[in-house]
Structures are given as C-alpha cells and as structure tokens.
Amino acid sequence: MAPPGAPRTGPGRPGDPDVVVLDHGSGNVRSAVRALEHVGATVTLTADRERALGADGLFVPGVGNFHACMAGLVAVEGPAVIDRRLAGGRPVLGVCVGMQVMFEGSTEPSAAPVAGVGEWPGTVSRLLAPVVPHMGWSELDVAEGSTLFAGLEGERFYFVHSYAAHTWDLAPPDGAFAAVAPRVTWATHGERFVAAVENGPLAATQFHPEKSGEAGLALLENWVRSL
C-alpha cells in the first residue's frame, strides 16, 4: 500500500468519473481500486485532503475493527472530508466498516473507543446469530426505487462481518422532500440488519461489492455512472 498522502492514479480515459479511494490505512484497497477501474472510473488511492474533496466520488473502505478504522480516518481528516463533501452534495460510498463508521458508534470492544463519523444516528452492534462472523453470500431485501441495485434485484452479495446496524433510526422526510427519503436495503443472518443505504449523496454497503463477482461490479458501475 502506498504511504498516506502518496497518490496512485489508475488507468482512465478523458471524461471518465474521477474517484478517490481514501487511503486511511485500511486493508483491501487494491481490489477496490481494480474493481472501480474495471467499471470505468479513473481511480486515485490517496489520503490527500484536497484530492479527496475535489473528486467526483469518494470511496471509503474499511475492514477489521470499527475503532481502528475510525482512528485511521481521523488521522487523515476523513470525518471532516466526508462531512464537507456531503454538505456540498458530493457523492461518498462507504463499504463494510466504511459503512459502519457512518453511524454514531459501535459496541465493538476496544482499548480506546472513538465515536463514529455520525452522519446517521444509531450504534453498530454484534450480530445475534448462531455463527459469527457472517462470512459468505446472502440475498437482500432491496429498497424500492434503488439506484445502486438497479437491475440487481434477486442477486446475492458477499459479506464478511460480525457487527452491523440493526435498526434505521433516521426519520424520513415528509412533504416536498418525501421523494428523497433514504432507501434502506436489508439482509438477514440470524437477525435482520442494514445491508445498504442510499441517502442522497451518501451511500454505503455492509457487504463487499468488490468481492461480489459480476453483481458487485454492476453495483459499482451503477454508482460510478451516477457521479
């Protein structure tokens, strides 16, 4: 992995969407970079604040421990970058722990727990299931009108996680803003949990699209085309 702040630009063509994969010390970034390049993005892996702010799309990866992931994000000013992008309507996609950190916190044990980014209310907690971690392919209950899952209803996606959001606590807008209410997609492993959210410019998946074969690539292509 390149050191934080050192950009690595992938192949692309003029006019392709410009995507930054935020390099905050998380693993699994190379497969994300390759997948995004495969679906037509010009990809830069970097922790540079200005590049992350200016890109058409920001991809926030995350694996392992919630609190370690947050510490890495804080070290590269990730929460401020995410917040500023969203305030300006600039797309962000979080994946796996990169989704969990969008909530207020986690019950995952840690010697030095830190709060989440806090874009969504709620706390991530351990799955109540006979077998944890949840590792493998699962079907989804896709939100009606989803952009991420357009053409992918009925497909399965690959999960590797022990913690998840079990409730969706953000009140839906009403009146003129009802049409832009968050779209929440669910999955089940022992219990129902949030598998993906589309909330204006902020989208996230608990599963790994970059490890989910053709369906995962199609989902990433849907996101890249929306940029």
Image: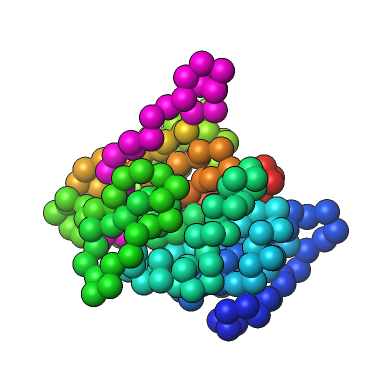
Q: Position of residue 187 (x, y in %)?
A: 33, 42
Residue 194 is left or right of residue 76, and the answer is: left
Residue occupying image coordinates x 59% and y 45%:
87
What number of labels is visible? 0
Tell me, yes or no, if residue 151 can be seen here.
Answer: no
Q: Is residue 93 magenta?
A: no
Residue 2 is left or right of residue 103, and the answer is: right
Residue 113: quadrant of the picture: bottom left
Residue 140 is left or right of residue 146, and the answer is: left
Measured along the vertical axis of the image, is residue 73 above or below residue 187?
below
Q: Is residue 159 magenta?
A: yes
Magenta residues span: 158-181
Q: For this rendering, which residue is in front, 73 or 203? A: 73
Residue 192: quadrant of the picture: top left
Measured along the vertical axis of the image, is residue 219 above or below residue 3?
above
Residue occupying image coordinates x 65% and y 54%:
57
Residue found farthest to the top? 175
Q: Position of residue 112 (x, y in %)?
A: 28, 72
Residue occupying image coordinates x 40% and y 66%:
70
Residue occupying image coordinates x 58% and y 59%:
81
Here the colouring is rainbow
Residue 172 is left or right of residue 202, and the answer is: left
Q: Position of residue 124 (x, y in %)?
A: 29, 52
Q: Position of residue 79 (x, y in %)?
A: 50, 60
Q: For this rendering, which residue is in front, 13 or 105? A: 105
Q: For this rendering, which residue is in front, 36 or 67? A: 67
